[in-house]
Image (cartoon, grey):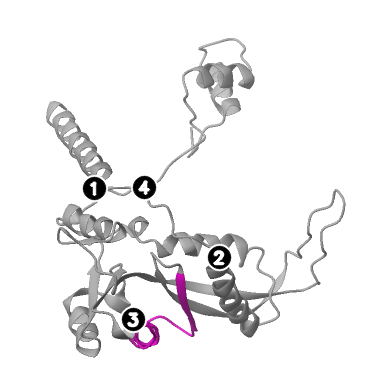
Amino acid sequence: MPLSRFSSTDIALHAQRSGLVASISGSTIWRWLHEDAIRPWQHRCWIFPRDPDFQRKAERILDLYERRWEGRPLRKDEFVISTDEKTSIQARLRIHPSLPVAPKVPMRVEHEYQRGGAWAYLAALDVHRVKLFGRCEATTGIEPFERLVKHVMSQPPYNTASRVFWVMDNGSSHRGQTCVRRLTRAHPTLVPVHGPIHASWLNQIEIYFSIIQRKVLTPNDFPGLAAVAERLEAFERYFESIGRPFKWKFTRTDLNELIARIRARYWEGQHLKMAA
């Protein structure tokens, strides 16, 4: 059948047309599938970790979240910063004003809008102190990222810290040894810590980005770009006043179990290919 996903009704129709049954309902199909926990109308994306140093790089980040580095506890004057960029944050100017909530009536937001431009939001989070630094820039890149780094590293306590670890992904703004040399030359106490490729879920700033997406940017109804920047900055201060460090539960033990499952799945796949 020319379908990417099947509903219970699609399966019932196919069963009848194929002559498997004379008649059957979609609800019956759903009940049978539900008993076996099979849901062909759902899908889940995944990506196989291809970084040859995946485990080592992930372990370093997990250790930092537990305030350890190379087997030793961090000192009081050593800090851990998680950083990344959230791109293309639009200012959507709705054609008609949004209507507030009322009894039994949700907030109403006009579907049509005019584009008022877009920001790249660069942010850094002190994972143990819930201190946030954010910048709205016209675009991402090396220079905007270095402005964020300079902004953080020039403020106390980071300007007098013995070491400040920056957890980051492998985006073009801060990729590779060239980035390491550039950052450490400008800030000798800064220690860049790159995560594995395709492992942004290890970066705690992504949790904060998901929060602002739900609480600040949805629904997107702003009179202009300046209002977006003001709202993001105000939310940073608000989040600092109510927030606590994220309860990071994924440990080295969990990582080792994950790697073992991945390896087992990989070799199982290799055996199936050889058998075929």
* Residue 113 image position (x, y, % from top left): 70, 72
> Looking at the picture, which amino acid does disc 4 mark?
Lys
Mark 3 is surrounded, within 10 Å at the Cα level, by few (under 14), some (14 to 19) or many (20 or more) other residues, namely: some
Gap in Å between the C-alphas at discs 2 and 4? 22 Å
> Looking at the picture, which amino acid does disc 1 mark?
Arg
Q: Secondary structure at mark 4?
A: loop
Q: Quadrant of the C terminus?
A: top left
Gap in Å between the C-alphas at discs 4 and 1? 10 Å
Q: Which residue is mark 1?
A: 252
Q: Nearer the viewer, residue 21 or 139?
A: 139
Q: Could you say which quadrant of the image residue 187 lies in?
A: bottom left
* Residue 27 image position (x, y, % from top left): 63, 20
Q: Are marks 1 and 3 in contact (CB under 8 Å)?
A: no
Q: Nearer the viewer, mark 2 or mark 4?
A: 4
Q: Nearer the viewer, residue 221 or 254?
A: 254
Q: Nearer the viewer, residue 187 or 29?
A: 187
In the rendered image, the vertical position of residue 122 relative to residue 12, given as above or below: below
Q: Which residue is mark 3?
A: 158
Mark 4 is surrounded, within 10 Å at the Cα level, by few (under 14), some (14 to 19) or many (20 or more) other residues, namely: few
Gap in Å between the C-alphas at discs 2 and 1? 29 Å
> Looking at the picture, which amino acid does disc 2 mark?
Ile
In the rendered image, the vertical position of residue 51 relative to residue 33, given as above or below: below
* Residue 90 image position (x, y, % from top left): 58, 74
- For residue 249, the mark is 4
Q: Is 148 colored magenta in this rendering?
A: yes
